[in-house]
Image (tube, rainbow, N blue to C red):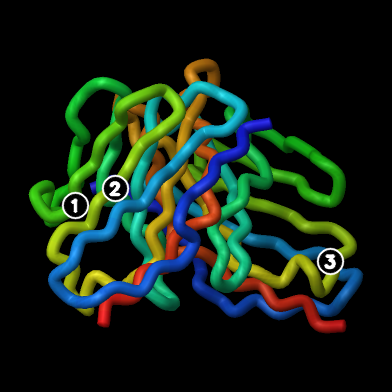
Amino acid sequence: GAVVSQHPSRVICKSGTSVKIECRSLDFQATTMFWYRQFPKQSLMLMATSNEGSKATYEQGVEKDKFLINHASLTLSTLTVTSAHPEDSSFYICSASTTSKQETQYFGPGTRLLVL
Amino acid sequence: QKEVEQNSGPLSVPEGAIASLNCTYSDRGSQSFFWYRQYSGKSPELIMSIYSNGDKEDGRFTAQLNKASQYVSLLIRDSQPSDSATYLCAVNGGGSQGNLIFGKGTKLSVKP
């Protein structure tokens, strides 16, 4: 149980384009989903927390107009990187917590983004 | 600023030995503690959670929590080369949404 999927697993795009990443909880309803970014050999950095049906809460220093988050249902959250630049190249990982064990986060497999 | 501290390693142990991974946290009010394993290039995988003082065992893994000392550890018995990974300690951040604060991780290398 508690399986989280992400799509795509890997994406290469040109600078200036937008990229959408999907995060789905496959066998449970996720009240809250989290989006992280991880640069090589560095720790996870929380970007934002999203709750179904409400606006995401962004961490300090994360541009909400650049990283658009939509949590339309209890099983799906999307992260759109708008006008991507090479410095946005990173490993983007989502996690989801269940309604019953709110603090236990289950991670998706991650999306590796390369902006050329 | 709530912090979670881990020795970055690398921690190198021979196959079959016990690997001991340590973590300290700054918020005395923290109630939930987690250990995640992250293989290179992969996302974190939950290994154990612990909420009460003492030990919690699951197979070859034992988590130990000491709230008075603000210390949580993970022991891996009979270490295998496949245990080689980065181990992340996470502590609840105190927010209403269940956010976690992660340490930077300890890299474990188990030598055959």
Q: Residue at horizontal 27%, vertical 76%?
A: A115
**Pointer 2 residue:** A79
Q: In the rendered structure, the residue with mark 2 lies on which chain?
A: A
Answer yes or no: are tags 3 and 2 on the same subunit.
no
x, y percent for residue A81: 22, 57
Q: Nearer the viewer, residue B27 or B59?
A: B59
Quarter holding the C terminus of chain A is bottom left
Q: Are marks 1 and 2 on the same chain?
A: yes
Q: Residue at x 87, y 75 (%)?
A: B15
Chain identifier of the residue bearing label 3 in the image: B
Q: Mark 3 and mark 2: span between their CA atoms?
A: 38 Å
Distance Cα–Cα, label 3 vs label 1: 40 Å
Q: Are marks 1 and 2 in contact (CB under 8 Å)?
A: yes
Q: Chain of mark 1?
A: A
Q: Residue at x 51, y 64 (%)?
A: B105
Which label is found at residue A67?
1
Q: For the point 84% across and 66% down, which residue is it?
A: B79
